Image: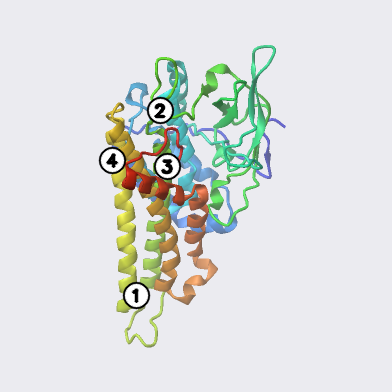
Amino acid sequence: MSGATAGAQVDLSVPDDVRTIASDEEAVAAASAYADAIRPDAVERDRSRRLPGEELRELARTGLLGARVPVAYGGAGVSNATVAEVFRLISAADPAIGQIPQNHFAFVELLVRSGSEAQREFFMPEFLRGARLGNALSERGGRTSRDWVTRLARQPDGSLRLDGRKYYSTGALTAQWIPVFALDDADEVAVAYVPREAPGVTVDQDWDVFGQRATFSGTTTLEGVVVPDEHVVSRALSHGERGDGGERAQPDTFAAFGQLMHVAVDAGIARGALDDGAAFLRERARPWWEADVERAADDPHLLRLAGELDAQVRACEALLASAARALDAADAAPGDLDAITAARLEVAAAKAFAGDTALHVASQIFDVSGSSAADARHGLDRHWRNARTHTLHDPARSKHVHLGRHLVDGVAPPVGHTLV
């Protein structure tokens, strides 16, 4: 069945009351209000594995999906710093929802940087009207996560046909468009932007992990999907400045931009965990009998631990903001390789630190809260489960190696390295 979804009926329409974000300040305000709206039901969504269909429609209504669209195409062209803050705010409320638009922003960025003028003129209005991009990137079964077998093949009649099977398809279940990584006839990586309801596209609701449950990052199957040439961006993963011959030989900030949003998700998890732990200490926890205090919140040992965690989360947020500013500086000087390298390394450091912080804080809040915090009805365990699931996205050890090599020998991360 064309566009079928196993086990779910989803509303793929776009709301007709989508606002247009006009400034960075409006984007942050919209994200803050949206976070407040989705926060109360975060525990229930996680517990019941509920598809956040209406929450994602509300995300479209905010106009945030078009916030990065350049001013020349009717958007606000918000800064990297604003993108980071938007993702941090939403992820502090519910990181499972916060992660869903990460690929949307990344593939809007790909069109801005590497798409043709015709592609930008077609797709930018789509995003401004509230259409969202999912993803179909990774595959199972290969020796590494980059061993793709999905093919975008030219047919005898001249058309392009897409065939393959993808997993970790975050947001694809409810998106209007799905960017797909595929190998073309020259074995080069191409990105095909495929309508979610195109014949031959099936998205399964088979996401079954212990964290980030509401992302529904399951399987996308593509069988004989016809893709117009104008919906394909080629050589999209060879990051760098395009030369006269179409080659990409120098580093750019595209991959770092994608990573920045992952940093923001981790920073949001850390802040959400800390805030919930503090609230539990203040409102529910009982004092230890030896502490000789009226409230658990008056125990100096618990206050010291809470303060230590607060300092770590503040440091995480400061690294996120610093990395975003470094990206903004590099994007303002696209030919400055020193600025580009500095930004890539800033993002790498922030990503490694944020992941560690999210895991640590999400675990340590139980030392602040006490044994009653383990009751499943409070949902405090979701913070660690979300952090552990999200930080598996890519290894922090790789980033530490890049940072160490640059510190010791002044060697920048290799060109085309997609993690920084």
Callout in the foreground (3, 2): 2
Picture layout, residue 381 above or below residue 420: below
Dividing the picture into quadrants, the one containing residue 139 is top right
Q: Name the residue under label 3.
A: 259
In the rendered structure, which amino acid carries the disc numbered 4? Arg
Outermost residue, front direction?
A: 409
> Between tags 1 and 4, which lies in front?
4
Mark 3 or mark 2: whose residue is earlier in sequence: 2
Q: What element carries label 1?
A: helix
Please say whether residue 382 is visible from this viewpoint: yes
* Residues under numbered marks 1 and 4 in contact, where contact means CB atoms less than 8 Å apart: no
| Residue for badge 4 | 325
Quarter of the C terminus within the rendering: top left
> Which numbered disc flags the more N-terminal residue, 3 or 4?
3
Q: What residue lies at 29% left-to-right and 39% top-to-bottom?
A: 326
Q: Is residue 20 left or right of residue 388?
A: left
At 27% from the left edge and 35% from the top edge, which residue is drawn?
329
Mark nearer the N terminus (1 vs 2): 2
Closest to the camera, between mark 1 and mark 2, is 2
Residue under label 1? 302
Q: Which residue is drawn at 30% across and 56% down?
A: 315
Per the model, the C-alpha gap separating discs 3 and 4 is 14 Å
In the rendered image, which residue does mark 2 sit on? 240
